């Protein structure tokens, strides 16, 4: 893992709750399905460890942001499903708004002192 990868992972780690709530906004999911949805959405570039996700599910449920229930599978083991609550939707919207504000500020700060040449995020001049 490069230094850049570690920095990106740290940034993402702080948003695990919001990422999970975002997945659940699209419908109820069981634990491993949430993991696969996150992994697939990033083309495999970001995976959240299962232990981290299950701790997140417990915390979100304890905080009333998600509810869980057991599925009624006809094949295989029973799965625990999660659904977002109204409180979870409100927290998701608030977190996304805070992220957007933070992103605007960081983008402004990254642009401070740039010369007439345009530079992309990786520092490449255009």
Image (cartoon, rainbow, N blue to C red):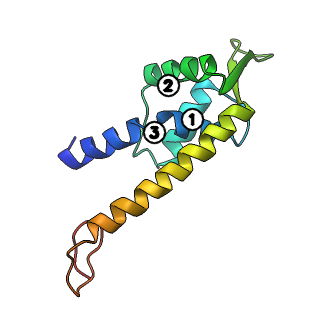
Q: Quadrant of the C terminus?
A: bottom left
Q: CA distance from mark 3 to mark 2?
A: 12 Å
Residue drawn at x 39%, y 46% as measured from the top left: 45
Residue drawn at x 57%, y 35% as measured from the top left: 20
Secondary structure, mark 3, is loop
Q: Image quadrant of residue 51?
A: top left
Left or right side of 22 for 11 = left
* Residue closer to the observer: 80 or 16: 16
* Badge 1 vs badge 2, beta-carbon distance below 8 Å: yes
Q: Earlier in the sequence, mark 1 or mark 2?
A: 1
Secondary structure, mark 2, is helix
Q: Which residue is mark 2?
A: 53
Q: Image quadrant of residue 105?
A: bottom left
Q: Which mark is residue 20?
A: 1
* Residue closer to the observer: 2 or 60: 60
Q: CA distance from mark 1 to mark 3?
A: 9 Å
Bin the neighbour count of mark 1 within 10 Å (Cα to Cα): few under 14, some 14-19, many 20 and up.
many
């Amino acid at each position: 893992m490069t230094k850049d990868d570690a920095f990106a992972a740290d940034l993402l780690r702080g948003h695990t709750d919001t990422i999970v709530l975002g997945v659940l906004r699209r419908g109820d999911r069981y634990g491993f399905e949430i993991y696969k949805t996150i992994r697939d959405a990033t083309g495999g570039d970001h995976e959240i460890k299962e232990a981290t996700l299950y701790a997140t599910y417990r915390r979100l449920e304890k905080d009333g942001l998600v509810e869980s229930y057991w599925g009624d599978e006809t094949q295989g083991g029973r799965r625990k499903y999660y659904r977002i609550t109204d409180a979870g939707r409100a927290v998701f919207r608030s977190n996304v708004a805070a992220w957007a504000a933070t992103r605007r500020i960081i983008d402004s700060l990254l642009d401070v002192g740039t010369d007439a040449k345009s530079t992309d995020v990786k520092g490449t001049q255009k």
